[in-house]
């Protein structure tokens, strides 16, 4: 455990379970339940950092609950340090144009690392990222910084993590691309113990009408359409927040970017949720890891999926470690539908 000044405070002992959820394009989370000893109560305080020595990321305690039945326990939960971005909004309007890595640098620097208002700065956080080969053309105003950045990453199929350096307490926000792995997962290979395959077209759309500035017949419109008949599924994308004066002759391409992102979000959802056999032939963080593209198949179901590992939940309790892995992107949740543009 590290205090809110990022200095080592001690080690948590006598815990009942730990759930450590790593996510590729989104912010990870954790939950820890421990015996409520005096030492654990002193360590497990709001704002303190929970670090696993075998992981790059660190969790921030955001919720605490103590209970007493046959024994006293303390349960804490929170999100990984990328959630520092959630403490800031886009304070004004940002016009983004260029590689994703440069656009995220613009957002994080302007609103967290070196903002004009020094009261908005969070010290000990730096940003670095290689060029990612993804062009961004959009504009954003007054939205939550974390939602904005992870939304860009998710739409671009790029990862985000915040690496913790325990020796200095520095947090480095970085973007990355998960590589292709040679790992193959299947119950037939006995490296999966359970599996759930999901395929959904309930939210699917392949044709977009994008509405920019203006009203009625004077509204600027763009469209993405290459389907016809029964196969054509249309959606309207409201992009009135994008101002033509900020993009000039590039305005149509900015509208198209917004529409393409929406169609990517509304693509046919395919995912495998699986529990990995810890005694199988695939070694975690050696043969496969978060963000990598692997092969998952079921001969009986006739399904083969070349998919990115988008989430890994590590669970530790008295019985040992369990890995629950999500391959690919599942169907939109109700929350995503409500928040979607």
Image: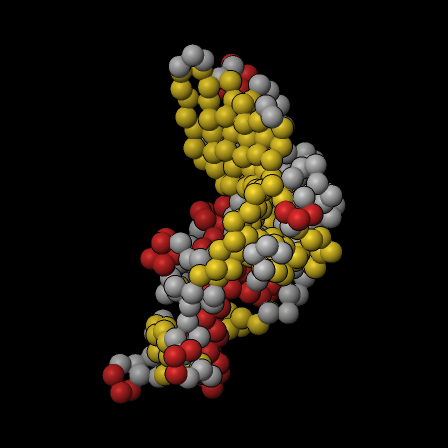
Examine the image and state in which quarter residue 66 appears. Answer: top left
Q: Residue at x 48, y 37 (%)?
A: 78
| Residue 132 seen by the camera | yes
The percent coordinates of residue 302 (x first, y second) are 58, 60
Q: Residue at x 69, y 53 (%)?
A: 184
The residue positioned farthest toward the top in the image shown: 70
Asked whether 3 or 298 is in front, the reply is 298
The percent coordinates of residue 108 (x first, y second) are 53, 56
The percent coordinates of residue 131 (x first, y second) are 66, 65
In the image, residue 51 sits, relative to residue 67, either above or below, namely: below
The residue positioned farthest toward the front in the image shown: 300
In the image, residue 290 sits, relative to residue 261, either above or below, namely: above
Q: Residue at x 67, y 61 (%)?
A: 130
Q: Residue at x 60, y 69 (%)?
A: 134
Asked whether 340 or 249 is in front, the reply is 340
In the image, residue 40 sits, relative to residue 139, either above or below, namely: above
Q: Is residue 326 left or right of residue 241?
A: right
Examine the image and state in which quarter residue 8 appears. Answer: top right
The percent coordinates of residue 59 (x first, y second) are 55, 37
| Residue 244 seen by the camera | no
Asked whether 35 or 2 is in front, the reply is 35
Q: Quadrant of the C terminus?
A: bottom left
Asked whether 78 or 86 is in front, the reply is 78
Q: Quadrant of the N terminus?
A: top right
């Amino acid at each position: 455990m590290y205090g809110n000044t990022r200095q080592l405070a001690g080690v948590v002992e006598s815990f009942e379970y730990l759930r450590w959820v790593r996510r590729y394009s989104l912010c990870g989370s954790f939950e820890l339940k421990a015996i409520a000893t005096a030492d654990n109560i002193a360590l497990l305080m709001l704002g303190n950092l929970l670090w696993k020595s075998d992981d790059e990321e660190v969790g921030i305690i955001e919720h605490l609950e103590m209970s007493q039945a046959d024994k006293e326990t303390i349960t804490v939960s929170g999100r990984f340090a990328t959630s520092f971005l959630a403490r800031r909004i886009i304070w004004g309007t940002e016009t983004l144009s260029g590689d994703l890595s440069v656009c995220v640098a613009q957002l994080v620097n302007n609103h967290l690392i070196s903002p004009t208002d020094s009261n908005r700065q969070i010290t000990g956080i730096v940003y670095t990222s290689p060029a990612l080969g993804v062009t961004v053309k959009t504009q954003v105003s007054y939205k939550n910084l974390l939602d904005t950045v992870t939304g860009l990453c998710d739409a671009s199929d790029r990862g985000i993590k915040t690496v913790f350096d325990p020796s200095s307490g520095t947090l480095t926000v970085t973007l990355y691309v998960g590589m292709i792995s040679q790992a193959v997962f299947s119950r037939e290979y006995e490296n999966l113990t359970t599996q759930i395959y999901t395929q959904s077209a309930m939210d699917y759309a392949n044709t977009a009408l994008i509405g920019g500035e203006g009203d009625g017949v004077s509204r600027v419109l763009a469209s993405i359409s290459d389907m016809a008949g029964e196969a054509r599924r249309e959606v309207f994308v409201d992009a009135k927040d994008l101002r033509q004066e900020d993009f000039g002759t590039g305005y149509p391409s900015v509208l198209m970017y917004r529409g393409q992102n929406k169609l990517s979000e509304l693509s046919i959802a395919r995912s495998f949720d699986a529990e990995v056999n810890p005694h199988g032939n695939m070694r975690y963080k050696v043969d496969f890891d978060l963000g990598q593209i692997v092969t998952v198949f079921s001969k009986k179901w006739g399904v083969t999926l070349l998919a990115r590992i988008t989430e890994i939940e590590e669970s530790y309790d008295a019985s040992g470690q369990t890995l629950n892995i999500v391959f690919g992107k599942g169907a939109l949740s109700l929350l995503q539908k409500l928040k979607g543009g």
